[in-house]
Image: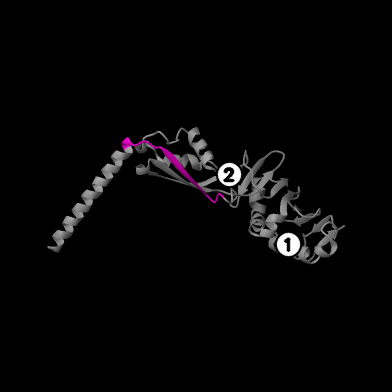
Amino acid sequence: MKTLTKLLLLLVCAAYLAFVFLKVSRTETITKCESVRTLVADSAKAGFITPAEVERILQQHALYPVGREMGKISGAEIEKALERNNFIRKAHVYKTPANRAVNIIISQRTPLMRVMTKSDDFYVDENGQRMQAGRYAADVPVVTGSADLRYVRRKLLPLGRLLRDDDFWNAQIQQLCVEPDGEIDLVPRVGSQLIHFGDPAQQAEVKLRNLRAFYEKVMPEVGWNKYRQINLEHTNQIICKK
């Protein structure tokens, strides 16, 4: 008897689910989309992608859903089109036919630094992914001089992450100048001195720690503009030029 009761309940549930599925499918077929709801994650940290930019991308690919039948809107196609934008890391799209809406959740790819040379201008994220600068602007350190994407990936990414993850350095270092031999100079926001960092891939954390101690113990005594160059190339000493 218990087995028969369970079987009947399963049949009722299956019939109900089939009814709901057919109803939703029919609703999608006859209902047209009236709105697009876009949520951009981490918008407080980066403002490259906005709901207006999402709409522009979808209009460009003839995928903007408003006015189209819900059943004919492909979330997968919308996701694919959005993820072609190199500032979008991930797009998730789902439909709510009852509200006649298409919902889009965007995860942004945030730049770590900007490379500006005579021949190129682009951003890179923390994984070394190239991001075309175009009309976008971000307050990140600028790399100039003898740099290309290969050099940035091989030499600068770890240093860039160190600068980003420390509030003091993130605010203080505004430019990384790459010399022809691959060594770099740092340009600070406060102070007129040039900081010769040497090879950026060699003991970068130690060099920054030494410089931080120099800033905290020496600079308040002598003044921020006393030296025109600070040399951090050797980790056991700091050499300054007046």
- As drawn, which residue projects farthest toward the right? 242
At mark 1, the secondary structure is helix
Pinpoint residue 214: horizontal percent, then vertical percent.
78, 64
Q: Which quarter of the rendered picture does the N terminus lie within?
A: bottom left
At mark 2, the secondary structure is loop
Within 10 Å of disc 2 (Cα), the crowding (few <14, some 14-19, many 20+) is: some
Instruction: Identify the residue shown where x is 84% and y is 55%.
Output: 228
Give the residue type at disc 2. Answer: Phe
Q: Which residue is mark 1?
A: 207
Residue 123 shows in this picture: yes
Q: Earlier in the sequence, mark 1 or mark 2?
A: 2
Instruction: Identify the residue shown where x is 20% and y is 55%.
Output: 10
Q: Which residue is mark 2?
A: 48
Pinpoint residue 17: horizontal percent, then vertical percent.
25, 49
Q: Which mark is residue 97?
A: none
Q: Distance from label 1 to label 2 (Cα)?
A: 33 Å
Q: Which quarter of the rendered picture does the C terminus lie within?
A: bottom right
Question: Closer to the observer: label 1 or label 2?
Answer: 2
Q: Nearer the viewer, residue 184 or 168?
A: 168
Within 10 Å of disc 1 (Cα), the crowding (few <14, some 14-19, many 20+) is: many
Residue 201 shows in this picture: no
Pinpoint residue 129: horizontal percent, then vertical percent.
58, 47
Give the residue type at disc 1. Answer: Lys
- Discs 1, 2 touching: Cβ within 8 Å: no
Pinpoint residue 128: horizontal percent, then vertical percent.
60, 49
Instruction: Note whether 150 is above or below 224 in the view shown.
Output: above
Q: Nearer the viewer, residue 60 or 30?
A: 30
Q: Determine if the magenta segment contains residue 40.
A: yes
Span highlighted in magenta in the image: 29-43
